Image (cartoon, grey):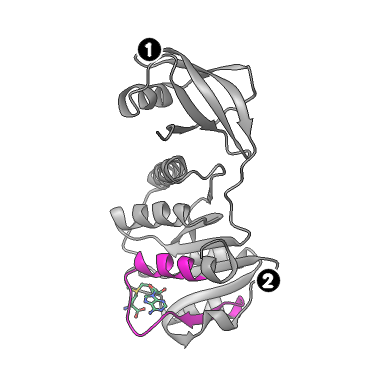
Amino acid sequence: MRIPRLYVEQPLAIGVPLELDSHSARYLRSVLRLSEGDSVVVFDGRGGEYRAVLETSGKSSARIIAKEFDPVERESPLHIHLAIGISRGERMDLVVQKASELGIAEITPLFTQRCEVKLSQARTIKKSQHWRQIAINACQQCQRNRLPDVRPAATIGEWLCASQSGLKLLLDHRGERGIAQRAPIDNRVVLLVGPEGGFEASEIAAAERAGFIPVGLGPRILRTETAPIAALGILQALWGDLQ
Ligand code: SAM
Protein backbone atom coordinates (compact mmCIF):
# COMPACT_ATOMS: atom_id res chain seq x y z
CA MET A 1 0.00 0.00 0.00
CA ARG A 2 1.30 3.46 -0.89
CA ILE A 3 2.07 5.61 2.15
CA PRO A 4 0.37 9.04 1.96
CA ARG A 5 2.57 12.11 1.52
CA LEU A 6 2.53 15.50 3.20
CA TYR A 7 4.47 18.72 2.58
CA VAL A 8 5.43 20.82 5.62
CA GLU A 9 6.97 24.30 5.65
CA GLN A 10 9.09 23.69 8.76
CA PRO A 11 12.48 21.97 8.41
CA LEU A 12 12.31 18.30 9.38
CA ALA A 13 14.83 16.31 11.42
CA ILE A 14 14.84 12.70 12.58
CA GLY A 15 13.50 12.25 16.12
CA VAL A 16 12.28 15.85 16.45
CA PRO A 17 8.48 16.06 16.99
CA LEU A 18 6.68 18.53 14.74
CA GLU A 19 3.34 20.22 15.51
CA LEU A 20 1.41 20.57 12.25
CA ASP A 21 -0.66 23.61 11.31
CA SER A 22 -4.44 23.17 11.35
CA HIS A 23 -4.63 22.83 7.54
CA SER A 24 -2.15 19.89 7.49
CA ALA A 25 -3.72 18.35 10.61
CA ARG A 26 -7.18 18.38 8.99
CA TYR A 27 -5.70 17.02 5.73
CA LEU A 28 -4.18 14.02 7.56
CA ARG A 29 -7.33 13.33 9.52
CA SER A 30 -10.16 14.08 7.10
CA VAL A 31 -8.63 13.55 3.65
CA LEU A 32 -5.98 10.88 4.23
CA ARG A 33 -7.99 9.39 7.13
CA LEU A 34 -4.87 8.69 9.19
CA SER A 35 -5.02 7.75 12.86
CA GLU A 36 -2.42 7.90 15.62
CA GLY A 37 0.40 5.43 14.94
CA ASP A 38 -0.04 5.52 11.14
CA SER A 39 2.92 6.24 8.86
CA VAL A 40 3.13 9.22 6.54
CA VAL A 41 5.88 10.33 4.15
CA VAL A 42 6.77 13.96 4.85
CA PHE A 43 8.95 16.35 2.87
CA ASP A 44 9.96 19.93 3.56
CA GLY A 45 11.07 20.96 0.07
CA ARG A 46 14.75 20.94 1.05
CA GLY A 47 15.38 17.62 -0.68
CA GLY A 48 14.67 14.01 0.22
CA GLU A 49 11.75 12.69 2.25
CA TYR A 50 11.13 11.31 5.74
CA ARG A 51 9.06 8.41 6.93
CA ALA A 52 7.18 9.79 9.89
CA VAL A 53 4.61 8.53 12.36
CA LEU A 54 1.50 10.41 13.42
CA GLU A 55 1.95 10.68 17.19
CA THR A 56 -1.18 12.61 18.14
CA SER A 57 -4.17 13.66 16.08
CA GLY A 58 -6.91 16.08 17.16
CA LYS A 59 -9.62 17.94 15.23
CA SER A 60 -7.28 20.67 14.03
CA SER A 61 -3.95 19.75 15.55
CA ALA A 62 -1.52 16.91 15.02
CA ARG A 63 2.03 15.97 15.90
CA ILE A 64 4.31 13.84 13.78
CA ILE A 65 7.79 12.52 14.41
CA ALA A 66 10.25 11.75 11.60
CA LYS A 67 11.82 8.30 11.89
CA GLU A 68 13.91 7.73 8.74
CA PHE A 69 15.33 9.89 5.98
CA ASP A 70 15.55 8.91 2.30
CA PRO A 71 17.61 11.37 0.24
CA VAL A 72 15.78 10.40 -2.98
CA GLU A 73 15.66 13.13 -5.68
CA ARG A 74 13.02 13.22 -8.41
CA GLU A 75 13.96 16.53 -10.01
CA SER A 76 14.65 16.89 -13.71
CA PRO A 77 18.20 17.75 -14.80
CA LEU A 78 16.54 20.35 -17.05
CA HIS A 79 15.57 23.62 -15.34
CA ILE A 80 12.43 24.94 -17.04
CA HIS A 81 10.90 28.31 -16.25
CA LEU A 82 7.37 28.71 -17.62
CA ALA A 83 5.94 32.20 -17.99
CA ILE A 84 2.32 32.22 -19.12
CA GLY A 85 -0.43 34.77 -19.69
CA ILE A 86 -2.98 34.38 -16.91
CA SER A 87 -6.12 32.68 -18.12
CA ARG A 88 -9.52 32.47 -16.53
CA GLY A 89 -10.50 30.18 -13.66
CA GLU A 90 -9.55 26.59 -13.82
CA ARG A 91 -7.30 26.83 -16.88
CA MET A 92 -4.49 28.44 -14.92
CA ASP A 93 -4.97 25.96 -12.07
CA LEU A 94 -4.65 23.11 -14.56
CA VAL A 95 -1.42 24.57 -15.97
CA VAL A 96 0.12 24.91 -12.49
CA GLN A 97 -0.90 21.36 -11.56
CA LYS A 98 0.28 19.68 -14.77
CA ALA A 99 3.47 21.76 -15.03
CA SER A 100 4.35 20.76 -11.44
CA GLU A 101 3.86 17.08 -12.27
CA LEU A 102 5.94 17.50 -15.42
CA GLY A 103 8.86 18.78 -13.38
CA ILE A 104 8.77 22.54 -13.93
CA ALA A 105 11.26 24.47 -11.79
CA GLU A 106 9.65 27.95 -11.95
CA ILE A 107 6.31 29.39 -13.02
CA THR A 108 5.59 33.08 -13.53
CA PRO A 109 1.98 34.13 -14.18
CA LEU A 110 1.92 37.11 -16.55
CA PHE A 111 -0.46 39.98 -17.13
CA THR A 112 -0.51 40.58 -20.90
CA GLN A 113 -2.54 42.90 -23.12
CA ARG A 114 -5.10 40.25 -24.07
CA CYS A 115 -5.22 38.75 -20.62
CA GLU A 116 -8.91 38.62 -19.66
CA VAL A 117 -8.17 38.42 -15.94
CA LYS A 118 -7.91 41.70 -14.06
CA LEU A 119 -6.88 41.39 -10.42
CA SER A 120 -6.39 43.89 -7.62
CA GLN A 121 -3.10 43.70 -5.74
CA ALA A 122 -4.79 41.88 -2.85
CA ARG A 123 -6.46 39.38 -5.20
CA THR A 124 -3.16 38.81 -7.02
CA ILE A 125 -1.47 37.87 -3.73
CA LYS A 126 -4.37 35.53 -2.88
CA LYS A 127 -4.19 33.96 -6.33
CA SER A 128 -0.44 33.39 -5.95
CA GLN A 129 -1.06 31.58 -2.65
CA HIS A 130 -3.77 29.52 -4.36
CA TRP A 131 -1.42 28.54 -7.23
CA ARG A 132 1.33 27.68 -4.74
CA GLN A 133 -1.09 25.39 -2.89
CA ILE A 134 -1.95 23.69 -6.18
CA ALA A 135 1.78 23.10 -6.77
CA ILE A 136 2.11 21.67 -3.25
CA ASN A 137 -0.84 19.30 -3.82
CA ALA A 138 0.67 18.19 -7.13
CA CYS A 139 4.05 17.48 -5.48
CA GLN A 140 2.39 15.53 -2.68
CA GLN A 141 0.62 13.42 -5.29
CA CYS A 142 3.43 12.93 -7.85
CA GLN A 143 6.20 12.28 -5.27
CA ARG A 144 8.29 15.37 -6.02
CA ASN A 145 10.23 16.39 -2.92
CA ARG A 146 11.03 19.92 -4.04
CA LEU A 147 8.39 22.50 -4.86
CA PRO A 148 8.43 24.52 -8.06
CA ASP A 149 8.95 28.21 -7.42
CA VAL A 150 5.60 29.92 -8.10
CA ARG A 151 6.81 33.46 -8.75
CA PRO A 152 4.76 36.60 -8.08
CA ALA A 153 2.58 37.61 -11.04
CA ALA A 154 4.18 40.31 -13.21
CA THR A 155 3.35 42.27 -16.32
CA ILE A 156 5.01 40.85 -19.42
CA GLY A 157 6.93 44.13 -19.79
CA GLU A 158 8.40 43.90 -16.28
CA TRP A 159 9.19 40.24 -16.72
CA LEU A 160 10.98 40.72 -20.05
CA CYS A 161 13.10 43.48 -18.47
CA ALA A 162 14.36 41.12 -15.75
CA SER A 163 17.03 39.01 -17.44
CA GLN A 164 16.01 35.37 -17.86
CA SER A 165 18.81 32.91 -18.49
CA GLY A 166 18.61 29.80 -20.67
CA LEU A 167 17.29 28.89 -24.09
CA LYS A 168 14.38 31.30 -24.53
CA LEU A 169 11.41 29.95 -26.47
CA LEU A 170 8.23 31.84 -27.30
CA LEU A 171 5.42 29.46 -28.19
CA ASP A 172 3.59 30.71 -31.27
CA HIS A 173 1.70 28.56 -33.77
CA ARG A 174 3.07 30.77 -36.59
CA GLY A 175 6.66 30.11 -35.48
CA GLU A 176 9.01 27.71 -37.23
CA ARG A 177 8.74 24.20 -35.84
CA GLY A 178 11.64 22.20 -34.52
CA ILE A 179 12.37 22.60 -30.81
CA ALA A 180 14.67 19.57 -31.18
CA GLN A 181 17.04 21.57 -33.40
CA ARG A 182 17.71 23.96 -30.51
CA ALA A 183 19.71 23.21 -27.36
CA PRO A 184 19.26 24.29 -23.73
CA ILE A 185 21.76 26.78 -22.36
CA ASP A 186 23.34 25.64 -19.08
CA ASN A 187 20.54 23.03 -18.84
CA ARG A 188 17.97 25.81 -18.71
CA VAL A 189 14.95 26.63 -20.88
CA VAL A 190 12.57 29.58 -20.50
CA LEU A 191 9.16 29.02 -22.07
CA LEU A 192 6.84 31.92 -22.82
CA VAL A 193 3.18 31.08 -23.59
CA GLY A 194 0.32 33.41 -24.48
CA PRO A 195 -3.08 33.67 -22.81
CA GLU A 196 -6.23 32.38 -24.51
CA GLY A 197 -6.33 35.38 -26.88
CA GLY A 198 -2.62 35.05 -27.74
CA PHE A 199 0.02 37.79 -27.69
CA GLU A 200 -0.20 41.23 -29.32
CA ALA A 201 2.32 41.76 -32.13
CA SER A 202 4.09 44.36 -29.95
CA GLU A 203 4.55 41.76 -27.17
CA ILE A 204 6.02 39.24 -29.60
CA ALA A 205 8.39 41.93 -30.91
CA ALA A 206 9.46 42.85 -27.35
CA ALA A 207 10.04 39.17 -26.51
CA GLU A 208 12.16 38.75 -29.65
CA ARG A 209 14.22 41.80 -28.69
CA ALA A 210 14.76 40.12 -25.31
CA GLY A 211 16.16 37.04 -27.09
CA PHE A 212 13.07 34.81 -27.35
CA ILE A 213 12.82 32.57 -30.41
CA PRO A 214 9.26 31.97 -31.70
CA VAL A 215 8.63 28.24 -32.11
CA GLY A 216 5.57 26.36 -33.33
CA LEU A 217 4.53 23.01 -31.94
CA GLY A 218 2.52 21.65 -34.83
CA PRO A 219 -0.25 22.32 -37.33
CA ARG A 220 -3.05 22.90 -34.81
CA ILE A 221 -3.75 25.86 -32.55
CA LEU A 222 -3.72 24.58 -29.00
CA ARG A 223 -5.52 26.06 -26.04
CA THR A 224 -3.40 28.11 -23.67
CA GLU A 225 -3.42 25.26 -21.13
CA THR A 226 -2.63 22.56 -23.71
CA ALA A 227 0.35 24.31 -25.32
CA PRO A 228 2.62 24.39 -22.24
CA ILE A 229 1.74 20.81 -21.28
CA ALA A 230 2.67 19.60 -24.79
CA ALA A 231 5.85 21.71 -24.80
CA LEU A 232 6.91 20.47 -21.36
CA GLY A 233 6.48 16.87 -22.52
CA ILE A 234 8.69 17.58 -25.55
CA LEU A 235 11.36 19.41 -23.51
CA GLN A 236 11.55 16.77 -20.79
CA ALA A 237 11.72 14.00 -23.42
CA LEU A 238 14.50 15.79 -25.33
CA TRP A 239 16.70 17.01 -22.49
CA GLY A 240 15.03 16.16 -19.18
CA ASP A 241 13.71 13.04 -17.49
CA LEU A 242 10.72 11.80 -19.54
CA GLN A 243 11.28 8.86 -21.83
N1 SAM B 1 -5.69 33.32 -31.58
C1 SAM B 1 -4.50 33.22 -30.78
C2 SAM B 1 -3.27 33.65 -31.57
O1 SAM B 1 -3.45 33.99 -32.73
O2 SAM B 1 -2.16 33.67 -31.08
C3 SAM B 1 -4.35 31.81 -30.29
C4 SAM B 1 -3.79 31.77 -28.93
S1 SAM B 1 -3.53 30.14 -28.27
C5 SAM B 1 -5.16 29.70 -27.84
C6 SAM B 1 -2.77 30.49 -26.75
C7 SAM B 1 -1.28 30.33 -26.75
O3 SAM B 1 -0.92 28.97 -26.88
C8 SAM B 1 -0.52 31.03 -27.85
O4 SAM B 1 -0.29 32.40 -27.55
C9 SAM B 1 0.76 30.23 -27.94
O5 SAM B 1 1.70 30.69 -26.97
C10 SAM B 1 0.31 28.84 -27.59
N2 SAM B 1 0.05 27.99 -28.74
C11 SAM B 1 -1.14 27.50 -29.17
N3 SAM B 1 -0.98 26.69 -30.23
C12 SAM B 1 0.33 26.64 -30.50
C13 SAM B 1 1.13 25.95 -31.47
N4 SAM B 1 0.60 25.18 -32.39
N5 SAM B 1 2.45 26.14 -31.44
C14 SAM B 1 3.02 26.92 -30.51
N6 SAM B 1 2.33 27.59 -29.57
C15 SAM B 1 1.00 27.46 -29.54
- Tell me which residue sits at (32%, 81%) in the image: 220
Whole-percent x, y for residue 83 in the image: 49, 63
CB of residue at label 2: within 8 Å of ligand 1?
no
Q: Is residue 137 above or below residue 227?
A: above
Mark drawn on residue 185: 2
Residue farthest toward the right in the current orientation of the protein: 186
Ligand 1: image quarter: bottom left
Whole-percent x, y for residue 153 in the image: 48, 54
Whole-percent x, y for residue 130 in the image: 39, 43
- Tell me which residue sits at (43%, 66%) in the image: 228
Answer with the quarter of the image where residue 85 lies.
bottom left
**Bounds of the magenta segment:** 209-234
Residue nearest the observer in this picture, 164 or 9: 9
Q: Total number of numbered labels?
A: 2
- Tell me which residue sits at (42%, 53%) in the image: 96
Residue nearest the observer in this picture, 235 or 222: 235
Q: Determine crowd level at label 2: few under 14, some 14-19, many 20+ residues with C-alpha closer than 10 A.
A: some
Amino acid carrying mark 1 in the image: Gly
Q: Is residue 208 above or below residue 9?
A: below
Residue nearest the observer in this picture, 241 or 118: 241
The residue tagged 1 is 58
Looking at the image, do the residues carrying marks 2 and 1 touch, with CB atoms under 8 Å apart?
no
Answer with the quarter of the image where residue 1 lies.
top left
Mark drawn on residue 93: none
Amino acid carrying mark 2 in the image: Ile
184 relative to 234 in the view: left or right: right
Residue nearest the observer in this picture, 242 or 28: 242
Residue farthest toward the front in the current orientation of the protein: 1
- The residue tagged with tag 2: helix, strand or loop? loop
